[in-house]
Image (tube, rainbow, N blue to C red):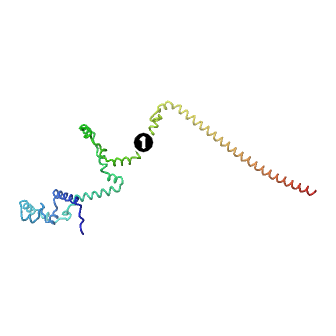
Amino acid sequence: MTTPQPDSTAFGFELRVRALEARVGGVPASQLAGLNLSDDGAPAAAAAAEPTDAVSRARQRARRRPVKEQQPHDADADAAPEPLTARVSALVAKLEAVVGSNPALKQFYDNYDAYAPLLRLSLPDETEEEEEGAEGDNNAAVQPRDLLPVGAKAAMVLEAKADIVDAERGLREIGLLDGRGVAGAGELEDIVALKPALVKGQATLHRRQKDVGEIRADVAALVSRYTEFTTTVSDLFVDVHEQLVEIEEVVARAERARRNEVAGRY
């Protein structure tokens, strides 16, 4: 199976990082034995052909090393440490996995470059020193908002559209109340002096409410009696109408019988 060729830029960066790690932390003995290299990076054959004082001293120290140090130790100890680029890639993958589960964090992570200037707090002393040392508009202190691109500013304004509309509506209502003279405390202090009259007015209002309730009950009873009376009268008229209809039928039959009787005589 062929190994995919890495990107030239990333591959060169990884080689530089590994070279720095080798200079700082050293190269594991397992890699030196596998690559047949000495500690200084030269081939073992060349080191043997041209012995130096440093190599001799290293060999003498190796001979004087205790046996327990020369015994083969665990494979994990000789294993090559994970490269810095691999560790950074793993951390970035974990960070993206955590951020992906939260939409707010994901938006902040995606637009971090736009929000970064807002995260840097400027101290008052530093601001004053920058203003004193400024010469003209070219040397003026740069505010964090000036570092944001126009697109980021427009996005922030669009996100805050609802809050801006609510704030504008609230300011209009406050201005309307202020124009009518009802904003603030107003004449609340005068209520303390008018408290006795207010208590008296409340008592009078309760009495009137009681009287109005009684009058409403009387009116309801009167309407009920009127309804009952009209219903009774209507029933009487219906009965009288039915009796008149019967009488008219009796009279009509009597007249027809009389006419028939008179016609039979003559």
Q: Residue furthest top?
A: 193
Relative to residue 11, is residue 64 drawn left or right?
left
The quadrant holding residue 65 is bottom left
Residue 107 % position (x, y): 34, 52
Residue 231 % position (x, y): 71, 47
Relative to residue 134, is residue 27 drawn left or right?
left
Q: If the image is split into quadrants, where does the C terminus sit?
A: bottom right
Amino acid type at circle 1 is Glu
Relative to residue 172, is residue 52 drawn left or right?
left
Q: What secondary structure is marked by label 1?
A: helix
- Residue 190's place in the image compared with 37, above or below, is above
Q: Residue furthest right?
A: 266
Residue 176 % position (x, y): 46, 37
User: How many marks on residues?
Assistant: 1
Q: Along the line of sight, which residue is nearer the eye, 160 or 240?
A: 160
Q: Along the line of sight, which residue is nearer the eye, 71 or 264?
A: 264
* Residue 186 visible somewhere in the drawing: yes
Is disc 1 surrounded by few (<14), some (14 to 19) or many (20+) residues within 10 Å?
few
* Residue 71 visible somewhere in the drawing: no
Which residue is pictured at 89% across the width and 55% down the height? 259
- Residue 43's place in the image compared with 109, above or below, is below
Residue at which label 1 appears: 168
Q: Residue furthest bottom?
A: 1
- Residue 112's place in the image compared with 122, above or below, is below
Which residue is pictured at 23% across the width and 64% down the height? 5
The quadrant holding residue 124 is top left
Q: If the image is split into quadrants, where does the N terminus sit?
A: bottom left
- Residue 146's place in the image compared with 100, above or below, is above
Residue 155 % position (x, y): 36, 49
Q: Along the line of sight, which residue is nearer the eye, 21 or 231?
A: 21
Which residue is pictured at 72% across the width and 45% down the height? 230
